[in-house]
Image: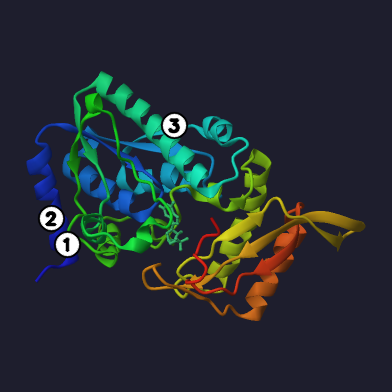
Amino acid sequence: QWTTASIVDDQVARIRAQVGDGHAICGLSGGVDSAVAAALVQRAIGERLTCVFVDHGLLRAGERAQVERDFVAATGVKLVTVDARQRFLEALAGVVDPEQKRKIIGREFIRVFERAARDLKAKGDVEFLVQGTLYPDVVESGGGTGASNIKSHHNVGGLPDDLRFTLVEPLRSLFKDEVRRVGLELGLPETIVHRQPFPGPGLGIRVIGEVTADRLETLRAADAIAREELTAAGLDSEIWQCPVVLLADVRSVGVQGDGRTYGHPVVLRPVSSEDAMTADWTRLPYDVLERISTRITNEVAEVNRVVLDVTSKPPGTIEWE
Ligand code: XMP
């Protein structure tokens, strides 16, 4: 019978056997999988692991601190943060097409990660790359379901030949719920272990229209309020995720404070789902919706309207782009 503790012991032993006295790097995304994979490898090889966190500027409020402060405090991991915010903004300037955004974000991400990996390799003998591949990912990339190609998802892959690494994939035989239990066993904070899914391209695909620094700031503020209120209402375990989407090219007339406004709408997209392949819109309590709406329109200057997405998947996808 496998207990969580025995999974940890077993994986730590496997990692030690694979890596020997070598060095490894791991890209952290802020998500559960990479965090748990890194924590396992850290437990196995200690400071011979270096984690790299790319801040692409498309993160939500507090996510960088969660990695730099909470994850590091919980694991003692050696972390390098690359501040690439300006670079991503420049690469995304003028781009409105969703797939184009994804391609650009994926490409820039690999370039930034590659540069960091190259620098680390130059300093030492890094031969291993840690990835948080789960069992369902293994199955999906082998067989593949048609629906997974509707939007191109990105992962760190496609590194050039001279940057070849041997992959360390300690989660390859685990399902998501097992990964979360392993994370808790390793002492990771609840906020990381029970984080809801968040797409790799981040807020870049939740600003409908061109991505700019101001628009990101607006969306980040609205998103933080929605998350705060959902958590305060104890609804985190009931919803799969709740994207907040900024319709940056749409304006509507409103009245706020002293007079007429001409601001942007944000969309709340709370969904219930088992696996994100299909989803239903979550019937959130009216009082929670009201608090979110009131706070966003009071506290976020550019937003004068909050609308609720009541579309299932299909026909809608969870994200708007
Ligand atoms: P959709 O919008 O396709 O989303 O219904 C299904 C799930 O996937 C997430 N998602 C992504 N995750 N890169 C990711 O890593 C992406 O490009 C991407 N697009 C969507 C979405 O948040 C939902 O959980």
| Residue 287 visible | yes
Badge 1 amino acid? Ala
Determine crowd level at label 2: few under 14, some 14-19, many 20+ residues with C-alpha closer than 10 A: some
Element type at mark 2: helix
Task: Please name the residue that numbered disc 3 is placed on.
Answer: 82
Amino acid type, label 2: Asp
x, y (%) of residue 93?
Answer: 61, 35
Work out whether 185 lies above or below 112. Answer: below
**Image position of 12 with respect to 3: above or below:** above
Looking at the image, which residue is at 63% across and 43% down? 210
Position of residue 172 in the picture relative to residue 194 (left or right): left
Question: Residue at the spot x=61%, y=58% of the render?
Answer: 245
Is the residue marked by circle 1 packed among few (<14), some (14-19), or many (20+) residues within 10 Å?
few
Measuring from the top left, give residue 316's x and y in whole percent: 52, 68
Extreme residue in the front direction: 146
**Where is 164 relative to 167, above or below?**
above
- The three-letter code of the residue at mark 3 reads Val
Q: Residue furthest right?
A: 258
| Element class at badge 3 | strand
The nearer-to-camera label among 3 and 1 is 3
Q: Judge depth for marks 2 and 3 and give the one in front.
A: 3
In the picture, measured across the screen, residue 14 lies left or right of residue 133, that is left
Expressed as whole percent of the image width and height from the top left, the position of residue 140 reads: 26, 59
Q: Are the residues flagged by discs 1 and 2 in contact, CB closer than 8 Å? A: yes
Q: Earlier in the sequence, mark 3 or mark 1?
A: 1
Q: Earlier in the sequence, mark 2 or mark 3?
A: 2
* Left or right: 281 as drawn, with respect to 253: left
Query: Which residue matches tag 2?
Result: 9
Q: CA distance from mark 1 to mark 2?
A: 6 Å
Measure the alpha-carbon separation of dots 3 and 1: 33 Å
Q: Which residue is mark 1?
A: 5
